[in-house]
Each structure stands twice: as C-alpha cells, then as structure tokens.
Amino acid sequence: MSSHRPPAPAPVIDGFNYVKPLGSGGFSDVFLYEQHRPRRNVAVKVLLADMGVKDARERFEAEANLMASLSTHPYIVTIYQAEITEDSRSYLAMEYCSRPGLDARYRKNVLSVAEVLALGVQLCSAVQTAHQAGIIHRDIKPANVLTTDYNRPALTDFGISGAQGSDVMGLSVPWSAPEAFISGHQASVSMDVYSLGATLYTVLAGHSPFVRPGQDNSQPTLIQRILDEPLVNLDRPDVPEALNQALAVSMAKDPENRFASAAQLAKSLQRIQADLGLSVTPFEILEELSGEDTQDFGGEATRVRRVVSIDDAQLPLGGEPLISRVPGQRASVEAPPEQVEEPVKQRFRAPLRDDQEVPNPEEQEREPVVPVVRKPLPKILGLAIAAICVIVAIAVAVNVFGAPEEEATPKGPVIASDTPADALLGAGVKPVEKFSSAVNGDTVKFSWKNPDPDDGDFYQWATVTATKTGELKRTKENSVSVPKAGSETCIEVKVVKATGDVSAAASYCAKS
C-alpha cells in the first residue's frame, strides 16, 4: 500500500494485540496484529473512520466476501475474519505475508526471466480462478502481489473488484489498459489480462511499460503513451523474443487482439518455459468435485471445490493514485505528481545454457518392482529377474562412478530431438499456406489458408522487413490489408488454437 498519509490510530480489537503499522491507502490502513487464538501474526486492514458511510462500508464488506470466496487458492491472500471494531470501523483479518512484496522486490533488483515466467503462470491461475467466479480484479499491479512466508506470490486488494461488465470506478494508471481511460467503459477479463502483462513487463524492466527514463513520466503523459504509443520490447539480452511477443499480445491496444483469457497467457508462458528447458510451472484452478466425491456428514451432503493443478499436457489453454471520470471524456487525473516513478537500475542473472535440459516428470522411469512369491520361480522368470538386476546395477554404477568432469544432469530420459517432446510446443499445429496478395492503391491485401481449421482459431501477424518485425496483431479472418512498404511488402502469420498452441511462423512477400 502507498504511504501518502500517516496511518490512523490502530483500533483496539478483541482477541488481537497491535504490533505495528504496515501501510496505508486511500480508503484504509493495514496493521500487524498478533491473534490470540490461534496464536499467529495477521495483517488487519481497517476502513478509515471517516469512510464509515454506507457506500464505503458496503464496498469494504464486498471486498471481504470476494476475497473469502477465492482465498482457498494458493496464490490469493487468505481471509480469516471480517468484523467491526468498537469504534465502528470495518476490518479484515488476513494472512500476513512477511516477505517483501513484488513492488519492493523489483524496485530493488529486476527479476530473472525464470522467476518472472513462474510468477506469471501462478498469477494467471489466481486471476483465472477469479474470472471463473465472475470476478474482475481491476487493479492488478506489483504493489498488489504480496509474498508469503513460503516465498509464493499472493494476490491481494480486491477493494475495487467487481462483477464482469460493471463500471470501472478506479484504477492505477501505469498498469491499466487503454480502454480503461474511456469514460463509461465496463470492466472485462481483457483488462485484467492487460494488467497481468503490464505487471510482468514491469518486474523485468524495472519500471512500468510506458515510463521513459529521463523523460516526463507524469500521469497525463503516461495515459497518452498507453493510448497511442506502441509497446517497446524489453532491452535485455536474456529475454527471449517469444516472451516479448507474449507481453505484446497481452498488452495489445485493441482488446480483441489480446489473449482471450488469463489461462491462454499462462499457456504461452509455460510454452516459453519448456523452450528454455525450465521446469513448467503448474497452472492451478478450482474444480467442482463430482457427485461421487461429495462428502456426507450426518446425512447432509457438502459440496466442495478443490484446487486442481493443470500441467503442460492438460492446460486448454506502493499503490498508485486513482483517477476520476468525466462523462463523455477521457478520464482526468486528480493532482498528478510530477513523476510517477523512477526506473530501477537493472542487474541481470546469467541466462540458461542452451544445452541445459529439464526432464518431463511424466516420462521418468520407475524402478522395477519384483513381486514376492512363495513357490519356486520358473527358470525363465528367474533369468528375467536376474537381467533386471544387472540393468539396475549398471544404472547405479553409472550414477555413482560417472565421469566427474561433466555437470550433473537431472534424472530422466534424454530425447534426441530438435524440439522438446512437450505438448506445450504446439507440435502438430500446421502453419498457414497458399498465400496470395493483391495491391490496391497504397495497400496490399494478403490472404492465406489454414490447413487444419478448428473452432476458436485465430491468427497472429506482423509486417516484417530485413531489419525488424512490426507490432504483433491478431485477427480471426484469413486475410489482412497493410500499407505498402516500398517495392516489396512482407508479413508473417501464425495460427493460434483455442488451446493456446501456436504454429511456426509462415512468411510471404508481395511485390508492391
């Protein structure tokens, strides 16, 4: 939370001992308390005394209900209690995350690519869980990602969250989608997808996506850049092009060109992990238990939801000031500071070696198990068991006495293939074919054929030259029109399945 004002006095709460303040925001303060029973440290979020009006209290209680409905998720802060203090202030007692949050971490030192990919999948699973419950967060940013004692991210501050399609009431400028600045625009899944991408970009760059070091970074300027300027690729040698593309898609200006869900963004990040030889982070969402899993206690069936970990083979695919609205106009800014934030000095970790491999746990062999029998074994079976023992002995010898000059590699089979044997890599997704083009004045219309069309397919495309690739865009049509680029105009196109799998790029140039 931000510290634009000192926190109000901490209230006396029965069953809790006050320890210290943790932070303050526009509508509430957060304090550290020690709970008596069970004995533990908890973070207590207290509504300001002068916010005790009906609307503010209702919003605060709505936040409690929203977070309580989601807080069984491993990457969402857990709510313990919601009550009213003796001086009539509403409060939430919640999980205390003692480690530095994401905001403090990236300002001190930008995160490695491996950390950000894992973090991205984890946050996407939390956001997808909220979306499946019909809840839009609307304020995803580094300051709202805490870190638990077990070093896991925990999404918090659902204070301005609401149902999908509800009006946007407040937001944090640097991480907000362009359409959020248009008066009357309603909250959507796509806006949260944009903010997820902006958050990941921030912790890789050391500053929010449209901050320009050494230039004017006031809020009005940031809003103009978010609305009008293209996203600049991350200038880090360890960031793969695929990650730059994933962030560009998640932060596309047009909501129709973004990933359709947080799950699709997670799928893209998992694919990059596999490409880099990293362990693929599980994607965890809530699933309704089937009827046979329903537990019966005293004759009353209890419907339970559980967290399901979806691996790569299963996946279908400090606070900032708020801004106010003027009907029919772009949102205006209340007393913007001269500079929103300062960029952070970047320090990078060494990239992963090209030859480093991580095994697929599903493909690891199990140790052979020999059953115990009471009668003499047939001769053939005895020979088979002896052969197995020899194989096991050889394997043990190799592990124990292997060549010392080589680095240890993870246990598991080595697959001799140009592409990892991983369902995430889009193997089998055929690229587009049979390109054609037609020049019409100052534009060139490109058309192509999808050799294996499915419901939900769309295309990512970009103009290309000998030196650079243009902004990545998305279309559901099998044709696009682009401005002529000299004597030859070129594009590249990829097929994207509804599952998130992507084909290889197919390129085509037209004489113009």
Image (cartoon, helix red, strand yellow):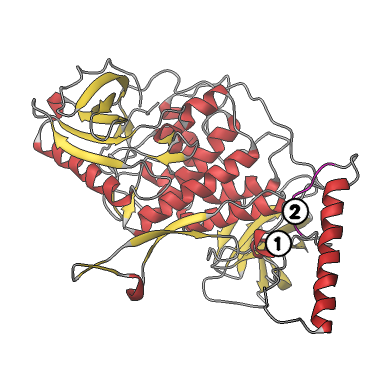
Q: Do the CB atoms of the residues marked 1 and 2 lie less than 8 Å apart?
A: yes
Give the percent coordinates (x, y) of residue 283.
Answer: 51, 55
Q: Residue at x 47, y 29 (%)?
A: 103
Is the residue 154 above or below the residue 509 in the image?
Answer: above
**Which amino acid is tagged 2?**
Lys
Q: Which of 328/14 is in front?
A: 14
Q: Nearer the viewer, residue 227 or 504?
A: 504
329 in relation to 292, above or below: above
Residue 188 locus on image (x, y percent): 36, 53
Q: Is residue 221 left or right of residue 280?
A: left
Specify start and end residues of the magenta stretch as a single range. Answer: 407-412
Could you say which disc has been placed on residue 364 in the image? Answer: 1
Query: What residue is at 29 percent from the left and 55 percent from the top?
Result: 165
Q: Say what secondary structure mark 2 lies in.
A: loop
**First-in-chain label (1 vs 2):** 1
Q: Which residue is disc 2 drawn over? A: 411
Gap in Å between the C-alphas at discs 1 and 2?
8 Å
